[in-house]
Amino acid sequence: MSQKQPKIGIIMGSKSDLNVMQDAADVLKELGVDYEITVVSAHRTPDRMFKYAREAAGRGLKVIIAGAGGAAHLPGMVASLTHLPIIGVPVKSSNSIDGWDSILSILQMPNGIPVATVALNAAKNAGILAAQILSTADDRITKNLIKYKEDLKKKVEESALEMEKQ
């Protein structure tokens, strides 16, 4: 968890999802974005989920990243309870059907309750997208994102040069 008032909440249905969701926390830390991270299960702790979603904006959160596997109701249920943008991360869990159940559960939201959905296990992209949302009102995050993307470009160019030398 970051030291300052977090702007992004990272939640997951089970601690077993942390191996995927940690990527969101890591990229946010790299980008200098404060976040909080916890377990909130739509099925096992619905009261906790309701409380988290309803109080998130009042606590200063601006975006919520919600990862879930299997039936993957967490992102959509949280989206139904708050006006904040929700980014859903489908997680291929032990009880998942190749991850498709999670993808479709998060992706196929009814009109009026949108959830931005990233690829299966793509919590890193969820973290980047959350930072991009915040960057519309924060020049420091914008600069960090520009540097991050430039570093990605340099890595690809270095790899290309290395391959071409062989």
Image (cartoon, rainbow, N blue to C red):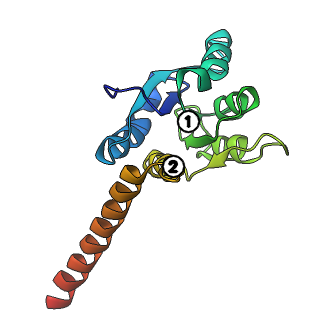
Amino acid type at mark 2: Ala
Q: Which quadrant is the N terminus positioned in?
A: top left
Q: What residue is disc 2 on?
A: 137
Label 1 SS: loop
Amino acid type at mark 1: Lys
Reading the chain from its start, which is encountered first: label 1 or label 2? 1
Q: How many marks?
A: 2
Residue 22, image x, y percentages: 38, 36
Residue 147 makes an appearance in the image: yes
Residue sticking out furthest to the right: 111
Residue 157, image x, y percentages: 26, 79
Q: Which residue is at a point 38% across and 40% down the rendered structure image? A: 33
CB of mark 1 within 8 Å of CB of mark 2?
A: no
The relative height of residue 58 versus residue 127 in the rendered view (above or below) is above
Label 2 SS: loop
Q: Which quadrant is the C terminus positioned in?
A: bottom left
Neighbours of disc 1 within 10 Å: few (<14), some (14-19), many (20+): some
**Structural distance between the alpha carbons of marks 1 and 2:** 11 Å
Residue sticking out furthest to the left: 165
Q: Which residue is at a point 59% across and 23% down the rendered structure image? A: 56
Between marks 1 and 2 in the image, the one whose residue lies nearer the viewer = 2
Residue 166 makes an appearance in the image: no
Q: What residue is disc 1 on?
A: 62
The relative height of residue 59 versus residue 89 in the rendered view (above or below) is above
Q: Which residue is at a point 76% across and 30% down the rendered structure image? A: 80
Residue 123, image x, y percentages: 47, 45
Q: Looking at the rendering, which quadrant does residue 44 occupy?
A: top right
